[in-house]
Amino acid sequence: MTAAESWADDLRLALRLADAADAITLDRFRALDLKVETKPDLTPVSDADRAAEQAVRSLLADARPGDAVMGEEYGDTGTGSRRWVIDPIDGTKNFVRGVPVWASLLALQVHGEVVVGVVSAPALNRRWYAARGSGAWAGHLGQPARRCRVSTVGTLADAALSYSSLGGWAELGRLPGLLELSGQVWRSRAFGDFWSHVLVAEGAVDVSCEPEVSLWDVAPLQVIVEEAGGRFSDLAGNRRPDGGSVVCTNGRLHEVTLRLLSSDQAGR
């Protein structure tokens, strides 16, 4: 059995989980009776976030009862070498304001390695997915997917950069590094959240970065970007989805990106 074949059933399940999440989130998007609360970390959570995660957990309990689950809204359940990671709505602030750039993020880790990932953005009618050894794929919902490949841009002067909000970088004292990087690229835009990173996988953007993330924010993005031929790391250069930060590139620009982002120390 090849590596791709070994994860095929899990990928099919992950796509089913995404379908279930999409049905809930899209139905609640821009709903007049949407209920929104503020969590202890001051981030919003809607009834759609909670309902989507509950639906995914219920399907996993039937399909993979022995697997552990980590979700943004309901924490950790179960133990073992296989763990599903769920972000029911990445981009909840967009979701509650009626901005269509949000997605459900689903990943499977085996012995800590992300082997399957799905990003589904139903309001954009788009989905991205990958499994180790089978490439990364993207397409419009209900239509055939196409294979994703990162760009071949080799210099920052020709590169497009996408990042998260300036405020987040400033709060962590890393704004000087981001400004240094943005001053050397051809074009920069703050697409933010999952959107920045899947654009790297598609080759539309060459570098993306966020200074503060949780595992559920980026787990599926790692396998998607890497299977598209790119590089994924935290700001320290470690290839891990739980490092608290994320940098994605086409590979050619990774080291110079990390070096420039570390220049946040210069102004202190």
Image (cartoon, helix red, strand yellow):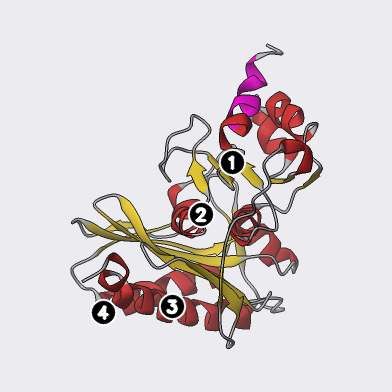
Tell me, for residue 252, which label it has, or none.
1
Q: CB of mark 1 within 8 Å of CB of mark 4?
A: no
Query: Is residue 187 magenta-colored?
Result: no
Q: CB of mark 3 within 8 Å of CB of mark 4?
A: no
Mark 2, secondary structure of its residue:
loop
Q: Residue at (72%, 54%) from the top-left corner?
A: 191
Quadrant in which residue 238 is drawn? top left
Q: Residue at (69%, 26%) from the top-left corner?
A: 177
Mark 1, secondary structure of its residue:
loop
- The residue indicated by pointer 3 is 15
Q: Looking at numbered disc 1 in the image, what kind of residue is underneath it? A: Arg
Q: Work out whether 211 lies above or below 50.
A: above
Q: Earlier in the sequence, mark 1 or mark 2?
A: 2
Q: Which residues are magenta?
A: 258-265
Q: Earlier in the sequence, mark 3 or mark 2?
A: 3
Viewer-side residue, 110 vs 205: 205
Viewer-side residue, 185 vs 212: 185
The CA span between labels 3 and 4 is 13 Å
Tell me, for residue 63, which label it has, or none.
4
Q: Outermost residue toward the bottom?
A: 142
Query: Badge 2: few (under 14), some or many (20 or more) residues near its Cα, within 10 Å?
Result: many
The CA span between labels 1 and 2 is 10 Å
Q: CB of mark 2 within 8 Å of CB of mark 4?
A: no
Q: Looking at numbered disc 3 in the image, what kind of residue is underneath it? A: Leu
Estimate the x, y position of residue 63 in percent, counting from the top left.
Answer: 26, 79
